[in-house]
Image (cartoon, grey):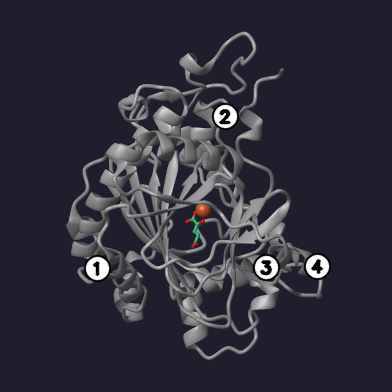
């Protein structure tokens, strides 16, 4: 069982506060954070409240002037060397970049945001059918996948959909988002293949290297819904975390709130119409033997909402693919020995989920003693 014992949740102050009961009744309502907001609350429940230091935005992002790189994928055939070197630099130094002219039509980007919103805004009795923490289900509409593991709940609800590599029946999805999710997955997969080719070249490997070891094969869509929050300074939309996958293609709407850790400061990722945010996941950091980095990021809560974002994860996630991933042999040498042990995606994701979001990188326990 990977949920904590009830006693772990009783923090003793104030007298009588029972965290576990609060989580349980929230979870059993199956209405998510959106349900709380719809009920008209003006104060956020205690399970969401964090220490101030955890939430306060550094002043740094106002002064530094640093913004995450933007890479133009237009005319790739002619500009390939330039793009590969921009991808290398961004993946090594920042772990994040935005791409423009990526080939996914604006109508599809708008469509997937609208479909995600419409799903979260279905009547509660329809939404209830999808609300589950059952890991073997292909589609779950749930609030806080790590509700019972983490210290503080996040101000967001999420639609999870495991579309590949295991066979996926579109009928599993609510009809309101079915066609759009299937369509977006096709586009995101193609863009992912292009990105894995660029990343392979950036690492000095053959263009099809990462695709051939199945990095592009597994797809999970996470459609996030961050309701307007009456006390945004007390909580977060998403706790700081690294992604437990190979790569993420992230689409955010116009509201903003995503921040990335760069040189010990939180840096805003400003919404950029038509752009997609790309970030390196833990498993790509692992197989690159730390040449490229999976970087912490988080989402602030906001008085304005809902904020919608769609994360497309390249990962085998819960699928039972037995392939082991470890540092790529071609990248290793006497002066660059392997620093991680091999692991399957499934093992990595289950290790990551047991920890919940927050804390040190989930890669740390996989480091070999040096
Ligand atoms: O909502 C966002 O902008 C970020 C979501 C995210 O970090 C994730 O799904 O891993
Ligand atoms: Fe993330």
- Residue highlighted by disc 1: 107
Q: In the image, residue 211 lies at what x, y percent?
A: 32, 30
> Between disc 1 and disc 3, whose residue precedes?
3
Looking at the image, is mark 4 or mark 2 nearer the viewer? Answer: 2
- Residue highlighted by disc 2: 291
Identify whether 327 is placed above or below 224. Answer: above
Task: Please name whichever residue, 64 or 7, is drawn nearer the observer in this view of the structure.
Answer: 64
> Between disc 1 and disc 4, whose residue precedes?
4
Quadrant in the picture for the N terminus: top right
> Between disc 4 and disc 2, whose residue precedes?
4
Can residue 193 be seen here? The reply is no
Q: Residue at x 53, y 73 (%)?
A: 26
Task: Determine the CA span between mark 4 and mark 3.
Answer: 9 Å
> Between disc 2 and disc 3, whose residue precedes?
3
Looking at the image, is mark 2 or mark 3 nearer the viewer? Answer: 2
- SS of the residue at dot 1? helix
Quadrant in the picture for the C terminus: top right
Circle number at residue 19: 3
Identify whether 181 is placed above or below 230. Answer: above
Task: Please name whichever residue, 292 or 44, is drawn nearer the observer in this view of the structure.
Answer: 292
- Give the total number of marks visible in the rendering: 4
């Amino acid at each position: 069982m990977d949920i904590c014992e009830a006693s772990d949740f009783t923090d003793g102050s104030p007298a009588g506060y029972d965290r576990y009961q609060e989580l349980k009744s929230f979870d059993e309502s199956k209405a998510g954070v959106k349900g709380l907001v719809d009920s008209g609350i003006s104060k956020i429940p205690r399970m969401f409240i964090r220490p101030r230091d955890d939430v306060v935005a550094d002043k740094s992002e106002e002064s530094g002037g640093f913004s995450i790189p933007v890479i133009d994928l237009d005319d790739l055939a002619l500009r390939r060397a330039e793009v590969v070197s921009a991808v290398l630099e961004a993946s090594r130094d920042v772990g994040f970049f935005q791409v423009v002219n990526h080939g996914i039509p604006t109508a599809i980007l708008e469509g997937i945001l609208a479909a995600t919103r419409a799903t979260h805004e279905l009547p509660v009795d329809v939404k209830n059918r999808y609300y589950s923490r059952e890991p073997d289900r292909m589609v779950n509409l749930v609030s806080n996948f790590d509700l019972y593991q983490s210290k503080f709940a996040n101000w967001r609800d999420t639609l999870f959909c495991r579309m590949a590599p295991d066979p996926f029946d579109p009928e599993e999805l609510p009809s309101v988002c079915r066609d759009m999710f299937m369509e977006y997955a096709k586009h995101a997969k193609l863009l992912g293949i292009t990105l894995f080719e660029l990343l392979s070249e950036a690492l000095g490997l053959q263009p099809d290297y990462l695709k051939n070891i199945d990095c592009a094969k597994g797809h999970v869509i996470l459609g996030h819904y961050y309701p307007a929050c009456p006390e945004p300074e007390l909580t977060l939309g998403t706790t700081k975390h690294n992604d437990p996958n190979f790569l993420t293609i992230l689409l955010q709407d116009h509201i903003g709130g995503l921040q990335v850790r760069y040189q010990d400061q939180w840096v805003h990722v400003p919404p950029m119409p038509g752009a997609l945010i790309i970030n390196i996941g833990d498993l790509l950091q692992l197989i690159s033997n730390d040449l490229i980095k999976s970087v912490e990021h988080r989402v602030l809560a906001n008085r304005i909402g809902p904020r919608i974002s769609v994360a497309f994860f390249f990962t085998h996630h819960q699928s039972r693919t037995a392939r082991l991933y470890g540092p790529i042999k071609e990248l290793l040498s006497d002066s660059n020995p392997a620093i991680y042990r091999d692991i399957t995606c499934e093992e990595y994701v289950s290790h990551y989920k047991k920890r919940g979001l927050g804390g040190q990188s989930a890669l740390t326990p996989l480091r070999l003693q040096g």
